[in-house]
């Protein structure tokens, strides 16, 4: 019986999500461009070995990140 709970929640969430998506659709192109740029930047950081420096900076700046994962 508990296996059906996520499906029931999803059924109730479909209508509000569809309304949100209709309003947000005009911004999707820009979101895709920004995410593509971040993906390229991440790849360059990995290739140049700078990703570890950024990770270290994040851990020093936000120590709570060390407890995640």
Image: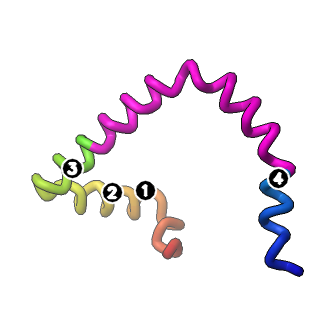
Of discs 4 and 3, which sits in the foreground?
Answer: 4
Circle 2 Cα neighbour tier, 10 Å, few/some/many (<14 / 14–19 / ≥20): few
Choose between 54 and 15: the one closer to the eye. Answer: 15
Circle 3 Cα neighbour tier, 10 Å, few/some/many (<14 / 14–19 / ≥20): few
Mark 4 vs 2, N-terminal side = 4
Q: Position of residue 5 (x, y in %)?
A: 84, 69
Q: Position of residue 60 (x, y in %)?
A: 39, 62
- The residue identified by callout 4 is 11
Q: Are dots 4 and 3 in contact, CB under 8 Å?
A: no
- Bounds of the magenta span? 12-39
Q: Secondary structure at mark 1?
A: helix
**Farthest bottom residue?**
1
Of discs 1 and 4, which sits in the foreground?
Answer: 4
Q: Secondary structure at mark 4?
A: helix
- The residue identified by callout 3 is 43
Mark 1 vs 4, N-terminal side = 4
Mark 2 vs 3, N-terminal side = 3
Picture layout, residue 16 above or below residue 9 = above
Q: CA distance from mark 4 to mark 3?
A: 38 Å
- The residue identified by callout 1 is 61
Q: Are dots 2 and 3 in contact, CB under 8 Å?
A: no
- The residue identified by callout 2 is 57
Q: CA distance from mark 2 to mark 3?
A: 18 Å
Q: Are dots 4 and 2 in contact, CB under 8 Å?
A: no
Q: CA distance from mark 3 to mark 1?
A: 23 Å
């Amino acid at each position: 019986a508990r296996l059906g709970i996520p499906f029931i929640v999803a059924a109730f969430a479909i209508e509000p999500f569809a309304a949100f998506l209709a309003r947000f659709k005009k911004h999707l192109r820009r979101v895709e461009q920004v995410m593509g740029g971040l993906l390229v930047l991440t790849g360059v950081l990995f290739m140049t070995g700078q990703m570890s420096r950024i990770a270290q900076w994040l851990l020093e700046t936000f120590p709570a990140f060390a407890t995640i994962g």
